Amino acid sequence: MLALVPLEKTFKEIVEDNISTMVSAIKGISPDVSEHKAIWKYDHAFDFSYGQTVGRISGLAYSVFVSQYRRPPNKSEQVEINAIIIAHAKEIRDAIKNLKTK
């Protein structure tokens, strides 16, 4: 059985930096996501934007992991990656709320 090793500090820093960059980028995007509504059939623009943003951040974090470690994360590492993202949930929500999505 493999011993569980916590994620390296450099990995966490890369993910944290990317989250900060993405949250900053939210401020520069158009708040109008109405063109997506017809395609994705959602009812609440905020929930769609929030899910889309967290999905992008999660995908980026997993890509960084695979690039750095040359393998997919195990369950324990997935929990750690998700914890990093969850720690920024309020910051992400607030940035999207400030867009006043339609």
Image (cartoon, rainbow, N blue to C red):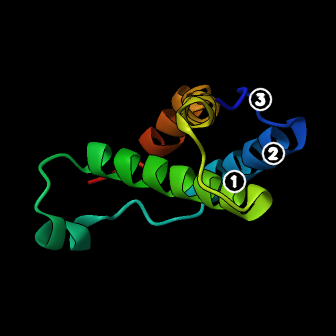
* For residue 61, side relative to residue 93 (left or right): right
Is there a contact, CB below 8 Å, between mark 2 and mark 1?
Answer: yes
Label 1 amino acid? Phe
* For residue 20, side relative to residue 53 (left or right): right
For the point 84% across and 41% down, which residue is it? Answer: 13
For the point 88% across and 35% down, which residue is it? Answer: 9
Whether residue 100 is visible to the viewer of this picture, yes or no, is no
Q: Earlier in the sequence, mark 1 or mark 3?
A: 3
Label 2 amino acid? Phe
Q: Residues within 10 Å of mark 3 (few under 14, many from 20)?
A: few
Quadrant that contains the C terminus: bottom left
Q: Residues within 10 Å of mark 1 (few under 14, many from 20)?
A: many
Q: Which residue is mark 3?
A: 5
Q: Which residue is mark 2?
A: 11
Q: What's the CA distance linking mark 1 and mark 3?
A: 14 Å
Is there a contact, CB below 8 Å, between mark 2 and mark 3?
Answer: no
Q: What's the CA distance linking mark 2 and mark 3?
A: 13 Å
Q: Earlier in the sequence, mark 2 or mark 3?
A: 3
For the point 64% across and 29% down, which residue is it? Answer: 1
SS assignment at label 1? helix
Q: Which residue is mark 1?
A: 65
Label 3 amino acid? Val
Figure disc tally: 3
Q: Nearer the viewer, mark 1 or mark 3?
A: 3
Give the vertical position of 38 relative to 23 (above or below): below
